[in-house]
Amino acid sequence: MKLVMAVVQDKDSNRLSNALVDHNFQATKLATTGGFLRAGNTTFLVGTEDHRVQKLLDIIKDNCQSREQMVAPVSPMGGNADSYVPYPVEVSVGGATVFVLPVEAFHHF
Ligand code: 2BA
């Protein structure tokens, strides 16, 4: 068994939830925050059998798109002014950042 953790953009979260239900994957959604943009994103936890992992990755890939996002400059107050970028920078976010972890035990009481 594997635990798949997928960080996706909030905009894709409902579509992905629906697709997972349609394909009989059980998931838990966590409201999370990206460490770089400090904006909300959604992390899905999905436990599944090894032979269904590829199908799950395909569903995530099909339902999460990559988007350009502007990063507003953050004041260097008290920090290092050398790395301060005084203008907005565009970064490409997503579609999804996915981790696949082995599961040692699974209990459903
Ligand atoms: P954030 O940390 O808010 O990052 C948003 C986007 O900003 C990233 O998109 C990437 O394009 C850019 N970015 C992140 N750190 C950067 C840096 N130090 N310098 C320049 N650009 C940077 P994604 O790579 O698609 O990541 C989307 C979200 O997935 C991340 O949101 C974070 O919540 C999660 N994530 C990505 N890689 C991760 C990792 N190795 N471990 C845990 N979470 C991760």
Image (cartoon, helix red, strand yellow):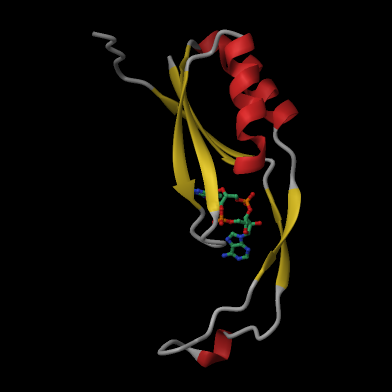
The residue lying toward the viewer, choosing from 104 and 32, is 32
- Where residue 3 sits: x, y (%)? 44, 24
In the rendered view, tell whether residue 62 sits above or below residue 34: above
Left/right of residue 58 with respect to residue 40 in the rendered view = right
Write down which quadrant ligand 1 falls in. bottom right
Write the residue at 54% across / 57% down: 39
Q: Horizontal and vertical percent for residue 2?
A: 45, 20
Q: How many marks?
A: 0
- The residue furthest left is 109
**Image-based side of 3 in relation to 7, left or right:** left
Res. 105 image quadrant = top left
Question: In the rendering, at what x and y percent does residue 59 appear?
Answer: 68, 21
Viewer-side residue, 53 vs 61: 61
Residue at the (62%, 9%) spot, across then down: 23
Q: Quadrant of the N terminus?
A: top left
Q: Quadrant of the C terminus?
A: top left
Instruction: Place residue 85 in its image quadrant.
Output: bottom right
Image x and y of residue 47, in percent: 44, 18
Q: Can you say whether 10 is above or below 56 in the image?
A: below
Is 15 drawn above or below residue 68 in the view shown? above
Q: Residue at x 53, y 51 (%)?
A: 40
Which picture quadrant has residue 17?
Answer: top right
Of residues 55 and 32, the one nearer the viewer is: 32
